[in-house]
Amino acid sequence: MLTSKLCRAEDFRSDWVLTWERALRDDPARPTGRLDFLDRKLWEWCAIARALEERDMLRPGRRGCGFAVGREPLASAFAVRGVSVLATDGPEAAEHWGPSGEHAASLDAVFNPGIIDRAAFDARVRHQMVDMRDLGALPDGGFDFLWSSCALEHLGSLEAGLEFVRAAMRLLRPGGVAVHTTEFNISSDTATVERGDNVLYRRRDIEALALRVRFEGAALLPPDFDPGHEPDDLAFDVAPYYSHGRPHMKLLLNGYVATSMLLVLQQGVRPPMPVAPPPPPAPEPPPEPESPAAPEPRLCLPRRVLRRCRRLFGCCAAR
């Protein structure tokens, strides 16, 4: 069963990638086989679908909610399996993703006619604008599963993305599953892109998320941080991407080598009241500078004693 993990070349030879690659294509009649091009976006979609399928989420009667779905095929692929889907995208994303055709401003943009017929799609899929930084319009415990594909790293900061994952857990019923993919920095666990349009998460950030969601009565399934060691794992694409004939599993992004990471979270029974994590410990105050050593006291003797010493010893005693 898939757990939280990084994208690796070996995955593209697995049955689950080959099966879901065919299910997500506009032309399912094309026979499946070995993939000629290794693309991490395809891996993300297949990994999300497989993780949900293994946990019995893709069947009639289930309710799912996708965030920043754009024109990805997942909403259609889940609906064809009988799932009721709420497909959301953010109003703030229209300016950034609209020109490239990746923003879903309406239900028409989400529909994929190569996967599902329009009548079945309209019966099972709804569209709603939702800001991922403010989930107040969505019902607590209203869904069996949630998903997003490389969206949380575009919320402006590392913290904003982690807070989205935590806050979204309240939308799940007990036993529900959240599956997200995001950008992961495989070249540094210290320096990274912490703010901006495309941040990069490090191992330390994912481990901090695992602790944070425990306060929601939830768990991040144990992460596998191995980025792979095959030749295709060691090669990385560089800008302009897709123009060098190199695999697009790893890429040079803002000065770091990055890849996609799958996060799988399980919701348990939520606490009876909101529980805030304890504040981080206050930093220790800097040590006080040492005061300069006091000069040794000078020995002051009465003049008559000094004169007597000089007469007795023939020297100047104890200045």
Image (tube, rainbow, N blue to C red):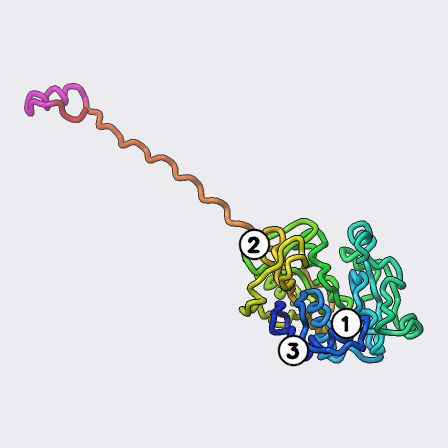
Which of the 4 image quadrants contains residue 158? bottom right
Is 104 on the left-hand or right-hand side of 302? right
> CB under 8 Å between callouts 2 and 1?
no
How many angstroms separate mark 2 from mark 1 (CA)?
34 Å
Secondary structure at numbered mark 1: strand
- Say whether disc 2 or disc 1 marks the residue closer to the N-terminus: 1
Sort mark 3 into few (<14), some (14-19) or many (20+) by Cα contacts within 10 Å. Answer: few
**What residue sits right under mark 1 in the picture?**
145
Q: Amino acid at mark 2?
A: Pro
Secondary structure at numbered mark 2: loop
**What residue sits right under mark 3 in the picture?**
14
Residue 37 percent coordinates (x, y): 67, 68
Q: Nearer the viewer, residue 277 or 122?
A: 122
Q: Which residues are magenta?
A: 302-315
Please say if 200 is above or below 311: below
Please say if 315 is above or below 118: above
Q: Nearer the viewer, residue 280 or 17?
A: 17
Q: Amino acid at mark 3?
A: Ser
Residue at 19 percent of width and 24 percent of height: 319
Residue at 55 percent of width and 64 percent of height: 234
**What residue sits right under mark 2 in the picture?**
281
Please say if 101 is above or below 11: above
